[in-house]
Amino acid sequence: MNRGIKLDLSKAVPYIQEKEIADMQPDLSIAHDMIENKNGSGNNLLGWVDLPKYYDRDEFNRIKAAAQKIKENSDALIVIGVGGSYLGARAAIEMLSHSFNNVLSKDKRKNLAVFYAGNNMSSTYMYDLVHTVEEMDLSINVISKSGTTTEPAIAFKIFKKLLEEKYGKEEARNRIYVTTDSKKGVLRKIADREEYETFSIPDDVGGRYSVLTSVGLLPISAAGIDIDEMMRGAEDACLEYKVEDLQKNPAYQYAAARNILYRKGKVIEMIVNFEPCLHYFGEWWKQLFAESQGKDNKGIFPASVDFSTDLHSMGQYIQQGLRIMFETFINVEKPRREILIKKDIEDPDGIDFLDGKSMDFINHQAFKGAVLAHNKGNVPVIILNVPELTAYYFGYMVYFFEKSCGISGYLMGINPFNQPGVEAYKKNMLAFLGKPGYEYKKKKLEEILN
Ligand code: PA5
């Protein structure tokens, strides 16, 4: 029996009063209408709203079949993509897999190894990755909605060649999966010409909202994760967070709470985990909120920390630095694995009082200690209680944050579904790289530099 996830705002008091939340209802109703009835800015990118209910079942089954084939013929899958075209898959795979899956021996490992490429332009990273995987049996999934993004395009070029040299063109074709726009873009053209198996990204779902489409689902399923359960979690969340009444909708309460804090000068939000496997969930969350809300000179700056690790680095600033932040803790109630601290009578080591306790119990005391300490240091804390880390709750959390992000953006008076600012560096980079058509821009940029 799944219980959903529970929002706890009690540690955000006194920065947020119940009445302030209740007073947000009229604004929230407007934002709710903009999303549910698709009449706000960016309304051509609201396909994610009802996706968990109405996703394309044929494509979904094709994804599962392709994932099965990858599992059968490959030791490793290379996921090529950047931003919204890879972070969701990585968040799910790292959250739900063995923490050291890639380095387990083949007989110990239940699932294939997964590596990521095309999310940076480092030659060292690429060289080392090729060196690591070249002798493995490989499949690749290249994911790019536009089909023109430089990072994945370079990585695809390298891995396509590697596969063709390793297996010959015919067998390489069997191992290359392309996820892109159904019609547009260079990648689509290449895929059609080479007759690769392709999956389409719905036109009305933007990159950072796309983890529950083929963008995330193929790599996640190939990594051995139950995507039916994931969609079930998202569907239950979709139902729970459809309610207009703020008092009954935790996703709206979260959106309201962060906007109230923002108006009071809390301009940084840190997502906090106590489970290393949630590190990439934090990365996914940061992209979702940064690209959705950082525009028009507005927006809460999203950051992430991994505790207890970062309590020994960022903890000092959080406790006593500028009082401009709030934290959102993800509290995982039940760990996937448990370890008991055994008694060692031979060697009293100063932590004997922990004998017989579970590591998770200790982790939870650190969690409680950090919440109260940061609270005392005037940091408002929002807590999201998640029963356990399963595919179901991954889907649930993804939908919770997607919905609250969209609502929160409309509450701030911005379009949460575009990202015009991302283009600026790309244009400069292409000019410096000498892309045809960018000659004038290159000249101008060089004048500035000199
Ligand atoms: O959320 C977004 O839209 C971006 O982060 C994109 O996903 C990212 O830039 C990659 O784009 P594309 O999928 O077109 O290669």
Image (cartoon, helix red, strand yellow):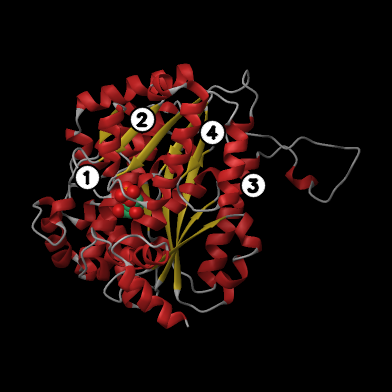
Q: Which residue is mark 2?
A: 177
Please name whichever residue, 276 or 416, is drawn nearer the observer in this view of the structure. Answer: 416
Circle 3 residues within 10 Å: few <14, some 14–19, many ≥20: few
The answer to the question of whether label 2 and label 3 lie on touching residues, with beta carbons closer than 8 A, is no
Q: Which residue is mark 4?
A: 336
Q: Tag 1's secondary structure?
A: loop
Tell whether 392 sits left or right of 412.
Answer: right
Circle 4 residues within 10 Å: few <14, some 14–19, many ≥20: few
Image depth: mark 2 or mark 3 in front: 2
In primary-sequence order, the first of circles 2 and 1 is 1
| Residue plotted at (58% across, 48% down) | 125
Compute the Cα span from label 4 to label 1: 29 Å
Q: Which residue is mark 3?
A: 362
Question: Callout 2, which amino acid?
Answer: Tyr
Question: Callout 3, which amino acid?
Answer: Ile
Compute the Cα span from label 3 to label 1: 38 Å
| Residue plotted at (88% across, 45% down) | 348
| Residue plotted at (57% across, 66% down) | 373
Q: Which residue is mark 1?
A: 48
Image: 42 above or below 298 = above
Tell whether 181 sits left or right of 277.
Answer: left
